[in-house]
Image (cartoon, helix red, strand yellow):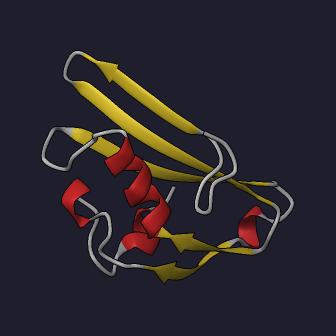
Amino acid sequence: MWNQGGYDPVLVVKENENQLMRFVQLTRSLHHDLKLQYFSECLEALGIRGGDGWKVEIVFIVDKEILADFKVGKVEQPGALSEYGWRNGGERDQVM
């Protein structure tokens, strides 16, 4: 999947007990909003449910020239990833 509303590529890893869903967002902006509905919709479409042992990560890749000033902007639909262990209202702090 590429260039969706909240992410660009998606990495899905399932090896024995290790299950990882990593969303990657490429950006050149100094700030980028976190639109959680798109992540939740993708997980649901793939049949990945919270409580099934999946780790969900959201990673921003930012040009090194703006990295020090980069900020996650508005969080839309807070709580949308709570069933995957994301803290409702604390999502901004969980982004990598």
Q: Which one is nearer the viewer's eye here, 67 or 42?
A: 42
What residue appears at the point 24 percent right and 66 percent down from the top-left corner? 82
Give how far across and how far down residue 11 sits, in percent. Answer: 51, 33
Residue with the most extreme top position: 16
Residue with the most extreme front position: 45
Position of residue 39 in the picture relative to residue 83 (left or right): right
Position of residue 32 in the picture relative to residue 63 (left or right): left
What residue appears at the point 40 percent right and 57 percent down from the top-left corner? 41
**Residue 30 position by quadrant:** bottom right
Residue with the most extreme left position: 51
Quadrant showing the N terminus: top right
What residue appears at the point 28 percent right and 40 percent down from the top-left corner? 47
Please state the total of marks drawn on the protein image.
Answer: 0
**Residue 70 position by quadrant:** bottom right
Give how far across and how far down residue 96 sits, in percent. Answer: 51, 55
Up-down relation of residue 36 to residue 12 (above or below): below
Give how far across and how far down residue 18 sits, in percent. Answer: 26, 25
What residue appears at the point 35 percent right and 35 percent down from the top-left corner? 20
Give how far across and how far down residue 55 sits, in percent. Answer: 30, 43
Up-down relation of residue 1 to residue 30 (above or below): above
